[in-house]
């Protein structure tokens, strides 16, 4: 029987955190593999533009950034396996990662799985997904050309995607449950100046209406219920860490389910690291994810060579 390869570092997730870790691992002489269920670049690939990453004075499209990352990994011969991680065993000296296509073993593991959308949890949301309900403006904006839509949320994502969507649609209702945004002030300033964006403050959504596709939103504004004609709803109500595969492990999570790390990206288990949006941190950006990945791989190398 062929002997299973024992990698120095198994990286779960090929977004900016995982990809950067693999670059630093290669340079430190570690063998590594990236296990990724979608594509290298992760969420950034479906983000319209990356405007705040140093070295790109004009910004860069998310898709192009993902492609460049992919090229960089190819040039370093980092293997990227297209697979879904199902469960892990992280206690021993050899970490075992069970996936939909087989088992991987590593002396160390980096968890860089990022986050997934937090559902709004109203009637019509799952029933009309892909038929007017969307979590991805970059993927779906073109289907709403000339239409009236809603965007729900008040964070950076809702603001950023409202700006993007306003270029396609006739009108955007930006629906937020409070009377002030959570997102950063420069995005707020931009959104509030767009003529075809109307902010509905203190407003929640009771129900998304529609037979075959979205036709209206039932909303409650300042305590009064009313119906809003709209053919789409983009939901940006925050993100949840992707940690389902950690069930049954002793890895420490915070009260919101994010992985607890120290400044070296070490988790509560020896040889197990976490980087990027999935960990408990202050600022969730591509640059901080990349930074986490670099730190984690360097710490893993130190652990292995110690
Ligand atoms: P977020 O900052 O957690 O904002 C979520 C928003 O959704 C909040 O305004 C929240 O309202 C609202 N919300 C949550 N649950 C809701 C519900 N059930 N009904 C109605 N509204 C609800 O999430 P995010 O915007 O996805 O951002 C996530 C992280 O990524 C943040 O750290 C953000 O800075 C980062 N990010 C950065 C950029 C950028 O810098 N360009 C872009 C995207 C994301 P309340 O405000 O009332 O809580």
Image (cartoon, rainbow, N blue to C red):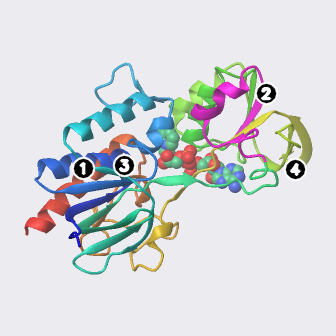
What label sits on residue 22 in the rendered view?
A: 1
Considering only vertical position in the picture, is 205 above or below 255? above
User: x, y (%) of residue 269?
Assistant: 30, 75
Q: Are marks 1 and 3 in contact (CB under 8 Å)?
A: no
Residue lying at the far front in this picture: please name it.
Answer: 1
Q: Which mark is residue 253?
A: none
Q: Secondary structure at mark 1?
A: helix
Q: Earlier in the sequence, mark 2 or mark 1?
A: 1
State yes or no: Cβ of the residue under disc 3 lies below 8 Å from any atom of ligand 1. no
Whole-angstrom CA distance, mark 2 to mark 4, is 23 Å
Q: Quadrant of the C terminus?
A: bottom left
What's drawn in magenta, residue-wise? 128-152
Closer to the chain start, of discs 1 and 3, is: 3
In the rendered view, does 207 fall on the left or right side of 33?
right
In percent of the image, x 51 and y 36: which residue is there? Answer: 46
Q: What residue lies at 91% left-to-right and 47% top-to-bottom?
A: 225
Q: Which residue is mark 3?
A: 14
């Amino acid at each position: 029987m062929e002997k299973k390869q024992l990698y120095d570092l198994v990286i779960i997730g090929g977004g900016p955190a995982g990809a950067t870790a693999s670059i630093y691992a290669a340079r430190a002489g570690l063998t590594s593999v990236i296990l990724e269920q979608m594509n290298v670049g992760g969420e950034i690939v479906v983000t319209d533009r990356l405007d705040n990453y140093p070295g790109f004075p004009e910004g860069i499209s998310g898709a192009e950034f993902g492609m460049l990352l992919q090229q960089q990994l190819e040039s370093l011969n980092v293997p990227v396996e297209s697979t879904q991680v199902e469960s892990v065993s992280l206690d021993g000296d050899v970490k075992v990662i069970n996936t939909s296509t087989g088992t991987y073993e590593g002396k160390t593991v980096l968890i860089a799985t990022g986050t997934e959308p937090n559902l709004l949890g109203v009637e019509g949301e799952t029933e009309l997904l892909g038929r007017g309900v969307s979590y991805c403006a970059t993927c779906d904006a073109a289907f709403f050309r000339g239409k009236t839509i809603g965007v729900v949320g008040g964070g950076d994502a809702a603001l950023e995607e409202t700006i993007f969507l306003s270029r396609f649609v006739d009108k955007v209702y930006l629906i937020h449950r409070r009377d002030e945004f959570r997102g950063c002030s420069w995005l707020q300033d931009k959104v509030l100046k767009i003529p075809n964006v109307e902010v509905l403050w203190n407003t929640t959504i009771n129900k998304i209406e529609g037979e075959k596709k979205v036709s209206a939103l039932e909303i409650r504004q300042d305590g009064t219920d009313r119906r809003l004609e709209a053919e789409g709803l983009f939901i940006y109500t925050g993100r949840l860490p992707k940690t389902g595969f950690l069930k049954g492990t002793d890895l420490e999570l915070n009260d919101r389910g994010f992985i607890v790390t120290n400044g070296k990206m070490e988790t509560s288990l020896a040889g197990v690291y976490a980087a990027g949006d999935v960990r408990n941190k202050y600022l969730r950006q591509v640059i901080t994810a990349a930074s986490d990945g670099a730190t984690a791989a360097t710490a893993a190398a130190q652990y292995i060579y110690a």
